Amino acid sequence: MKSPSASDPAALRRAAEARMNERSPAGVPQTMADLRRLQHELEVHQIELEMQNEELRATRDELAAGLERYIDLYDFAPVGYLTLDRDGKVLAANLMATRLLGLERATLLHRRLAGQIINDDDRRAFLDWLERTFTSGLREACEVAIARERAAPLMVRFEAVASEGGHECRAVLLDVSERHRAEAERIRLIEQLTRSLSEVKELGGLLPICGYCKKIRDDQNYWHSVESYIATHTNAKFSHSICPECERKIVQPELNALLRQAGVAP
């Protein structure tokens, strides 16, 4: 006969009374030995209940400690954690995710990321990533810009994999703004270097230059000073000075002549 479940107290009570009547039809101990046996059983049962209670308390304390460790690991992780449904609605978020998205947790929960948080230009890319995550069964990633209510826009990377049931996905949220800025700066420097190289190449051919005044003739047959020609074809700027040779050949003789005119011997 199958024992009644503890979830049905009435059935359990009836079964216990029936078993007690089977042991003692009159429902009360018949002899002193029966009384001692009943007392012994009650004491043993009491100890069993105390042991079960201790085990339950230990299990409860262990679960509470595990929950506390999980909260510490989840909430205070250095990366953002999100749980999203198929529509991109936020089901759970840790503190770093709320900080990156610029919203309080109460405001962020049950909110669709593609609705207002993801920038318009990247919304289609985000929705495509969400679809791939739930259909491929693999870890999928995308990088989009997010609009934050009380902070500057941010470039973030989403990486997620769908749960076994396929009803939600667990996503990691990373701030990649610095990498995007570095990439943009690298592209800018490459473009600047390319322009500089093209300007240098313009001066790499044969330049007609006057043998007397040192002017340079351009493609339209106009003559320009060296300074104006180079300034036109490159980003170089000039600052004038005197080289040691010219100082020795030109400046110093002129200075000596002025000194002699003034009656001061050089």
Image (tube, helix red, strand yellow):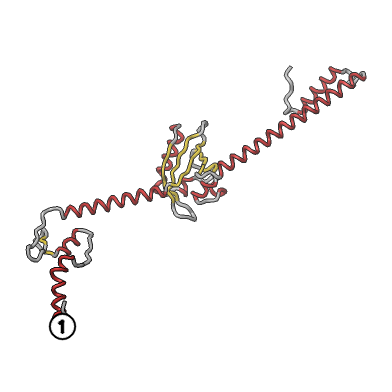
- Residue at 34% over, 51% down: 185
Q: What x and y, as percent, mark residue 119?
A: 42, 49
- Residue at 71% over, 32% down: 56
Q: Secondary structure at mark 1?
A: loop
Q: What x and y, as percent, mark residue 47?
A: 79, 28
- Residue at 74% over, 27% down: 8
Neighbor class of circle 1 (other Cα within 10 Å; few <14, some 14-19, many 20+) is few
From this view, report whether residue 262 is shown above or below residue 194.
below
Q: What x and y, as percent, mark residue 266?
A: 16, 76
Kind of residue indicated by mark 1: Gly
Q: Residue furthest left?
A: 211
Q: Residue furthest bottom?
A: 263
Q: Residue furthest right?
A: 31
From this view, report whether residue 254 is shown above or below residue 209.
below
Quadrant hosting residue 66 = top right
Q: How many marks?
A: 1
Q: What x and y, as percent, mark residue 252?
A: 16, 72
From this view, report whether residue 177 is shown above or below residue 248.
above
- Residue at 56% over, 41% down: 73
Residue 29 placement, left or right of 14: right
Residue 266 placement, left or right of 55: left
Quadrant hosting residue 16 = top right
Out of 124 and 56, give the one closest to the viewer. 56
Q: Which residue is mark 1?
A: 263
From this view, report whether residue 258 is shown above or below residue 219.
below
Out of 211 and 236, give the one closest to the viewer. 211
The quarter of the image holding the N terminus is top right
